Amino acid sequence: MKRETNDWEPKIVAFLCNWCSYAGADLAGVSRIQYPTNIRIIRVPCSGRINPFFILSSLQHGADGVLVCGCHPGDCHYLTGNYNARRKFALLQSLLEYAGVEKGRVQFSWVSAAEGGRFAELVAGVTESIQALGPAEKLVKR
């Protein structure tokens, strides 16, 4: 049963690390750089602290897409948090693929505090790709 997609706008949950990605999002806002409003930001101390269950739970509760952003490798405020995140999310991608969740529904990226423009471009790209996939059907609780 496919939902009507004519005027549909995706709901995207974004987990952003406090030290880099959230600061990059803040820079985009302060610089008045426009990006889609489909994103709902959740600030976390470090991308390495994101439990993969948070991502699965977001999809179950109606998010059409999830974006996880952390510090660039080697620049983590907690030294190795983003390396831990990269390993966890590689495994999570395999699980999502096995569960039938479309590739691109959950995306990971690195954004520094000085990359406000890159953050805005990333959000626009993620929104566009989620919109192309259509409303989420897998894992959604009804």
Image (tube, helix red, strand yellow):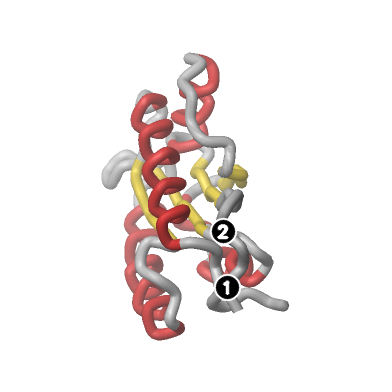
SS for callout 1? loop
Q: Which residue occupies 50% across, 57% down?
A: 66
From this view, report whether residue 44 is shown above or below residue 49: above
| 27 lies above or below 45 | above
Question: In percent of the image, x 61 and y 46: which residue is there?
Answer: 42
Q: Residue at x 41, y 25 (%)?
A: 116
Extreme residue in the left direction: 74
* Residue 39, picture quadrant: top right
| Residues at marks 2 and 1, CA–CA distance in whole angstroms | 8 Å
Residues at discs 2 and 1 in contact (Cβ within 8 Å): yes
**Outermost residue, bottom side:** 98
Q: Quadrant of the C terminus?
A: bottom right
Query: Residue 132, position in %: x, y?
Result: 41, 56
Which disc, if any, is residue 5? Answer: 2
Residue 33 in percent (x, y) is at 46, 20
**Which numbered dot is residue 114?**
none
Residue 100 at x, y = what percent?
43, 81
In-front residue for pair 121/26: 121
Q: Is residue 61 left or right of residue 30?
A: right
Mark 1 residue type: Lys
Circle 2: residue type: Thr
Question: Horizontal and vertical percent for residue 54?
Answer: 59, 65
Vertical comparison of 14 with 21: above or below: below
Extreme right residue here? Answer: 142
Residue in front for this viewpoint, 36 or 89: 36
Residue holding disc 1: 2
Alpha-carbon neighbours of circle 2 within 10 Å: few (<14), some, or many (≥20)?
few
